[in-house]
């Protein structure tokens, strides 16, 4: 009789888990919008409540410092005086820093599903500044360090003619360091944001490890490699190799993984949390790799591609190197001619577009801006939908785990009562 009861209870728990799995899969904004939004609001409220309680318990100094600092800032903003100009300047710097850091966070957060803000914002900003500097022969184009793309605000130097900046300072090649100095601040801020965006997987995995659980990503990788295509199979094998070599997740390894674009760094962050790699070791390696090494590599690539003068120098060196090679020297002249033709067409098109901006540019810029903003906003909306859905699903999963644990405890207690009666 007891065996039949145990089998029935196991079947009931299995059915409950299947029901929970189906509920999780069907919880999306498209299928269940109201329930998803309600669970998202509950999850955010729970997170805010836990954060506030933690601050009130452990941060006794913050209880006085935060209100005092907030009151001081409000007082300085609402009162007039000689400090008003400096406060406005400070606000512009705060908006500038916050904007690029948020873009960096949006690029790396979400386990690979983040918004590609380097392609959408930072890369085009560096490219436009480089081409404008080459066209005008000078780099002092910005009115201030925060004179960049900022929400709907376009940089002031983008629409100005070169004569408004003065005569060219550099007649031939603009030094690479001069252009880099003008754009490196926003690039580093964006890189800091990408490093901050890698922290949630680390903290989630570390919390799961401390509670004796395994994060979902690792549990899925424990299963056999499914046949989902060639690239998917290679990626899953690479992930499994990284898991099998997790004992080598030291500072140099994390730094190397963070310094180059790769889809495995999210897994590296999860493994660092799962195996209790110290926070500062993980974060400092990630910060140096993403905010310094990787950012400067990407910035250097964009500046080199958009600086035709620098490309000419590189071209001369490459021609000199390969001209002595027996197999390459015969085809080198025709190859160089084709590359020069393609580059000249590109530069002529960009110059013609800039020259005609006063007459025909307004209509074109309007249509291009409309298309560009539409694409960007669609990607932003998709990113927000993913965040809301994943947050709601995580909250529902916690509630389901709590329900299963309560039912398991009730089952164990009910099973122990007959056993106690028999023993008596």
Image (cartoon, helix red, strand yellow):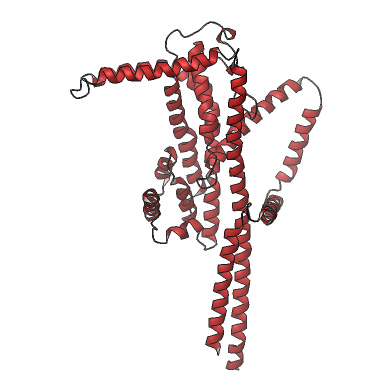
Q: Give residue 6's quadrant in the image.
A: bottom right
**Residue 48 appears at what percent x and percent y?**
69, 50
Res. 314 visible in picture: no
- Residue 104: x and y in percent read 55, 37
Q: Who's the residue at 62% across and 86% down the image?
A: 417
Q: What residue appears at the point 49 percent right and 14 percent down from the top-left corner? A: 351
Compared with 108, 90 (above or below) is: above
Determine the residue located farthest toward the right in the rendered image.
79
The part of the image, by quadrant, that contains residue 362 is top right
Quadrant showing the C terminus: bottom right
Q: Is residue 88 above or below residue 193?
A: above
- In this rendering, the answer to whether 383 lies above or below 39 is above
Residue 207 visible in this rendered orientation of the protein: yes
Q: Residue furthest left?
A: 326
- Percent from the top left, x then y, of residue 406? 63, 72
Answer left or right for 299 relative to 44: left
Image x and y of residue 202, in percent: 52, 50
Total numbered badges shown on the rendered structure: 0
Front in this rendered view, residue 51 or 42 = 42
Quarter of the image where the N terminus is located = bottom right
Q: Name the side, left or right, on which 181 lies relative to 378.
A: left
Residue located at (43% from left, 47% from top): 264
């Amino acid at each position: 009789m007891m065996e039949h009861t145990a089998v029935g209870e196991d079947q009931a728990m299995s059915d409950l888990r299947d029901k929970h799995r189906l509920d999780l899969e069907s919880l999306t904004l498209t299928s269940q919008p109201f329930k998803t939004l309600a669970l998202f609001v509950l999850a955010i409220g729970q997170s805010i409540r836990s954060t506030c309680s933690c601050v009130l318990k452990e941060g006794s100094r913050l209880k006085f410092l935060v209100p005092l600092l907030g009151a001081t800032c409000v007082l300085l903003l609402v009162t007039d005086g000689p400090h008003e100009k400096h406060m406005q300047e400070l606000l512009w710097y705060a908006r500038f820093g916050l904007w690029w850091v948020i873009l960096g966070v949006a690029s790396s957060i979400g386990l690979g599903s983040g918004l590609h803000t380097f392609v959408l914002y930072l890369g085009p900003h560096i490219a436009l500044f480089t081409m404008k500097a080459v066209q005008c022969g000078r780099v002092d184009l910005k009115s201030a360090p925060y004179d960049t793309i900022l929400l709907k605000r376009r940089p002031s130097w983008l629409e100005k003619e070169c004569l408004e900046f003065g005569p060219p300072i550099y007649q031939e090649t603009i030094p690479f360091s001069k252009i880099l100095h003008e754009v490196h601040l926003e690039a580093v801020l964006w890189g800091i944001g990408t490093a901050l965006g890698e922290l949630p997987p680390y903290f989630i995995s570390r919390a799961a490890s401390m509670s004796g659980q395994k994060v979902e990503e690792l549990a899925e990788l424990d299963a056999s490699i499914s046949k989902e295509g060639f690239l998917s199979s290679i990626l899953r094998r690479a992930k499994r190799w990284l898991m099998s070599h997790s004992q080598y997740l030291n500072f140099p390894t994390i730094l190397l993984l963070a310094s180059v674009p790769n889809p495995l760094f999210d897994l590296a962050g999860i493994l660092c949390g799962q195996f209790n790699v110290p926070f500062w070791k993980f974060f400092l390696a990630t910060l140096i790799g993403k905010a310094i090494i990787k950012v400067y590599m990407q910035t250097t690539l964009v500046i080199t591609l958009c600086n035709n003068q620098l490309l000419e120098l590189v071209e001369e060196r490459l021609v000199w190197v390969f001209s002595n090679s027996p197999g390459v020297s015969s085809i080198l002249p025709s190859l160089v001619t084709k590359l020069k033709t393609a580059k000249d067409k590109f530069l002529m098109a960009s110059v013609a577009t800039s020259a005609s901006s006063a007459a025909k540019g307004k209509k074109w810029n309007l249509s291009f801006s409309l298309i560009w903003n539409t694409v960007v906003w669609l990607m932003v909306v998709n990113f927000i939908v993913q965040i809301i859905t994943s947050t709601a699903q995580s909250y529902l999963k916690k509630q389901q785990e709590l329900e299963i644990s309560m039912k398991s405890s009730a089952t164990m207690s009910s099973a122990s009562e007959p056993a106690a009666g028999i023993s008596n």
